[in-house]
Amino acid sequence: MTAALRVFFVGGRISYRALFNWIRPGLYVTTMLGSPLFQILFFTYLGRYATNRDDDFFIVGNAVQVSAMAGIYGMVMGIANERWYGTLSSLLATPANRLALFGGRALPFIANGLVVSAFGFAVGWLFLDFSPAPGSLPALAAVVAVTVASCTALGMLVGSIGLRARDVFFAANLVYFLMLLICGVNIPVDELPGWLEWIATKLPMTHGIEAAREISDGASLADVSDLVATEALIGAVYAVAAYALFRFFEYEGRHRGSLETL
Amino acid sequence: MQLARLMWVSWLFHLKSLSTSSFFLLTSILQPIIFASIAFFMFESGQQEGTLLYVALGAGLMGIWSSTLFGSGGSIQWQRWQGTLEICVAAPARFLWVMLPLTVATASIGLYSIVATLMWGRLFFGMPLELDQPWLFALALPVTILSLGLLGLLLASTFVLYRNANAFSNLLEYPVWLVTGLLVPLSLLPGWVEWISWVLAPTWGIEALRNAALGGGQVWPAIGMCALLGAVYLALGAVFLENFERLAREKATLSLT
């Protein structure tokens, strides 16, 4: 149990730090915070011009969604880079607990996603007059935490596919952009065509963003408990699917000798 | 004549090469379609009429900017990683003429973006494809692409100073979309933004394309500004590239990644 916990926490931290082997911390921070800053400004101004909704709709939607910078991109790199840099075979040759090995990688990215999202809300407050009631902030933080974890589970799923697929970063980019369209970030889900709305309800983020909007409008955590529970359940399903895929591709990679095939 | 042949053959080669990249498929086709869809739905929700073509052109030019930014911004670094930079520098032709077709090609694959967003709007949103001045539109499009390609040359010659230019490129995508008025009119942004927009070719490119497609404004001045800015980018890019080449030769850092 102790060994598994060590793999979970220490292994996860080392995996996160490994990203800085090829990207400088300053640049990583700039990318993680700079791009979300301009994304929030872009969609809020577009929303002002194109729709009759107030800024808060776009600020909340995008401030939650930008956590996918860490949850999707970071998580995908955290898993798929093992194969890309040729360390996957060594990693899988260890007797380490696979659940701890896999799950531990998510923790730093969830924390990272929370920081990015908090920064997004700060941008809204600083530049766009976003001012939720101070009393709603703990509930907002709780909802965002669940949503970020759920989104990271989707990142784990895409990352697991990266153990087999050749160009998983294409998929990561596509998922990130599709979230902007489908998950109610900039367009209310009920205004999408029926089939897109159906997909939206099965994806992480959708329910979390809706809950975050209601809380910033004055609802309590209890009022949005159904939405939060659904978001958590969706995240759990994606996490289980991601782990199952991870184990399947590990088995298949050993069986076919394709762990290092690029 | 030799220069024209070099330009044509290199441009065609890079265009074909970029067209096989899944990353550029994403930035020049899928990403513009996704952004066009978001904008279509947002405008539809705001019940604004007659904006579909406005959105399709804006999203298309957003795609051209993305492919130029990522393609040109990292082009020299990419040549380094592939081990072809020394060969390009050692070629008898000036390095400027070797790089120019590459950066113009990165802007040219943005043509896919315009075609994709126009077709997307037509097929899925019933957007009418009636252009007010089709011949001027046909002229404005290549001039816009060329001016963005020349801006790409300037990006290539300056981004090479940074080891992680790709991360820097990520940072510049949204701001230029915003300050050049591709989807949001500049009048909605703070006044100082307009000064920045004047020196960026996409501002004039979208103005030329929109005026030619939708009418209601002059096309020639915007085309002229694209051409003028293109010439300025070329001059600056030539100076920076020459400087880069000289320093890299002196310090023997050409192949260092």
Image (cartoon, coloured by chain):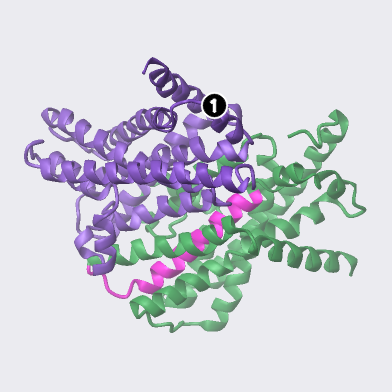
Chain colours: A purple, B green
Q: Residue at x 42, y 76 (%)?
A: B214
On the image, which quarter does residue B104 sit in?
Answer: bottom right
B36 on left or right of B23: left
- Determine the residue positioned at 72% across, 61% down: B14
Asked if residue A40 can be seen in this view, the reply is no
Amino acid residing under circle 1: Thr
Whether residue A162 is situated above or below residue B201 in the rendered picture: above
Q: What stretch is highlighted in magenta?
A: B47-72
Q: Is residue B71 magenta?
A: yes
Residue furthest to the front:
A255
Chain of the residue where label 1 is placed in the rendered structure: A
Image spot of residue B113 (x, y percent): 52, 66
Q: In this view, does A199 lie above or below B244?
A: below
Residue nearest the viewer, comparing A111 with B224: A111
Secondary structure, magenta segment, majority class: helix
The residue shown at (34%, 71%) is: B51
- Name the image quarter holding residue A86: top right
Q: Assign the N terminus of chain B to one quadrant of the image.
A: bottom right
According to the image, label 1 marks what residue? Answer: A94
Asked whether residue A13 is drawn in magenta, I would say: no
Q: Is residue B113 above or below residue A257?
A: below
Of residue B219 and residue A169, the one placed in the foreground of this image is A169
Task: Give x and y (percent) for residue A44.
Answer: 30, 49
